[in-house]
Image (cartoon, helix red, strand yellow):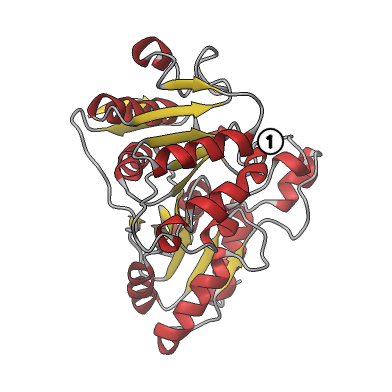
Amino acid sequence: MRTVFFREAIREAMCEEMRKDQNVFLIGEEVAEYNGAYKVSQGMLDEFGPKRVIDTPIAELGFAGISVGAAMNGLRPIVEFMTFNFAILAMDQIINSAAKMLQMSGGQIPMPIVFRGPNGTAGQLAATHSQSFDVMYAHVPGLKVVNPSNPYDAKGLLKASIRDNNPVVFLESEQMYGDKGEIPDGEYLLPIGLAEIKKSGKDVTIVSYGKMIKVALASALELEKEKISAEVIDLRTIRPMDYKTIVESVKKTNRLVIVEETWPFCSIATEITFHIQKNAFDYLDAPVKRITQADTPLAFSPTLIAESLPNVKKVIKEVKEAMYVG
């Protein structure tokens, strides 16, 4: 095992797959000459050249459309958006072309394409640059949505996404690129659609994903000090979702708290809650709790940002309410 940064894990996944398959290429704003806006693609232009590491104009709809066409013709594009806030402009290609092509072609045209880049909040970037798009993409049949929380998962899941013959939306975070974690020396892949129990527990289940896993795990450690044993589940993949792991955990703990960065209306928590009431209702000893971003565009003020986003204090409060303790 060796320790790498999150951005390095992403880079290794792309480089390994590009060495393995000449049809894989990277395209996006500043991915080549500038080595990536967050240095994720550093050195890739030198190794693979300008035909496989391609700088684009600031035209997300345009280069997303080019990439969809390339995938239709047998190539395997990795499309980097500087931020998924900019990818709003490319949603027509992601949702109306990439997600639907296999169905509209009667199964004749697969769509092996990965749309990746940072998603969600990243400090004082204000309302139009601080949005989480997990739910929007997960709502669409035909798309797979992956949101890793650490370098190990990022590399293994990205390699699996690049090899997948379906379009994958791969969500990262500016605030995670500098995170460190251990990865194996040899090649490995992780299956898309399988959650991971990050911490075992018996009193309450906390479900989260992406960078909110840090909040969930920190909350679980604080709860241990008060003799509350929390089981923490990292979804890793939003669609397809591993409902089975969540249901089995709730059957053991009898309580569920969900932590996510998205807005509350039509959230991931809403989807999970439906499946729990359908498949584990009789096991619940308390209503399902959720902690989300406030139902408002994110402000620029640090004080309002802190008030809007999930944090350890909020999670502990909801867990204690679910436990009926003060």
Query: Dot 1 corresponds to which residue?
Result: 123
Q: Position of residue 56 (x, y in %)?
A: 58, 24
Location of residue 95 with respect to 25 vertically, above or below: below
Q: Which image quadrant: the C terminus? A: bottom right
Whether residue 210 is visible, yes or no, is: yes
Number of other residues with Cα within 10 Å of mark 1, as a class: few under 14, some 14 to 19, many 20 or more = some
Would you say 161 lies left or right of 94 here? left
Relative to 81, 72 lies left or right:
left
Residue 248: image location, x then y, percent: 32, 74
Q: Of 206 and 15, which appears nearest the observer? A: 15
Front residue (pair 119, 178): 119
Horizontal side of residue 119 vs 249, given as left or right: right
Q: Is residue 325 visible?
A: no
The quadrant of the picture occupied by the N terminus is: top left
| In this rendering, position of residue 174 left or right of residue 111 | right
Above or below: residue 25 compared with residue 118: above
Point out residue 325 in the picture as x, y percentages from the top left corner: 56, 74
| Residue in the image at 56% along x and 54% along y | 95
Give the residue type that dot 1 points to. Answer: Gly
Please, which residue is most extreme toward the top here? 46
